[in-house]
Image (spheres, rainbow, N blue to C red):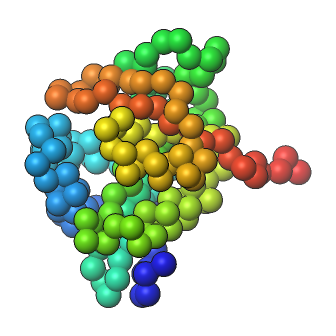
Amino acid sequence: MIEGLQLRHHSADEAKEILDQLVGLYLEVYAGGGEFYSEDRYRRQLDLHMQRARWELVTASIGGELIGYIYGFPLPPQTRWWDGIHEPVPPGFTEEDGTRTFALSELLVHPARRRQGVARALHDDLVASRTEQRSTLLARPDNVEAQTAYRSWGWIKITKLQPNWEHSPVFDILISARRNPPSSN
């Protein structure tokens, strides 16, 4: 772990105060990634996602400088998250009730701070705070570094998904089940 690393949870209202920093880091991480990774598209995505019930952001900083973040939200009953999923999938896989699946939407770390445990710290902190039965995320098949990390953290690939977003790549759908589900006492 990096010395001086501070993790902080933010609500959507708190995240709005650092929105330009979040977008700026996103643009650094995805520089040269193509039209899908544009500032305009990402600002629209963030705006839509931040409106979701129980949306949560965890930031990583050192000395007040943002070096990474992760965010997500529970999938509601009529979610469009699964639109574009490649069949076949297990029966009931895409059925949501607002408490079943946490969608991890972004996990990114400044290029100069990678391979230092920041992504793992962010991931573990956010996922540990969730009560949903499982988590899901979309990862590019060609992002070997991310795919390797997710596999080592217990994520498994289910299938692929082609989102209905302009210039969107095809993604792998990964799932991670809660290791210690909350008790029903």
Do we see residue 10 in this rendering?
A: no
Do we see residue 159 in this rendering?
A: yes
Q: Position of residue 139 (x, y in %)?
A: 39, 39
Quarter of the rendering containing residue 48: top left
Residue 54, relative to residue 60: is it above or below?
above
Residue 38 lies left or right of residue 133; in this view the side is left
Q: How many marks?
A: 0
Residue 80, relative to residue 177: is it above or below?
above
Residue 4, relative to residue 37: is it above or below?
below
* Viewer-side residue, 140 vs 82: 140
At 27% across and 22% down in the image, what residue appears? 164
Q: Position of residue 1 (x, y in %)?
A: 48, 78
Quarter of the rendering containing residue 94: top right
At 47% across and 53% down in the image, what residue appears? 149
At 55% across and 64% down in the image, what residue appears? 125
Residue 56 lies left or right of residue 36; in this view the side is right
Q: Position of residue 80 (x, y in %)?
A: 41, 25
Q: Position of residue 143 (x, y in %)?
A: 33, 44
At 32% across and 63% down in the image, what residue appears? 109
Q: Residue lying farthest right?
A: 185
Residue 142, relative to residue 117: is it above or below?
above
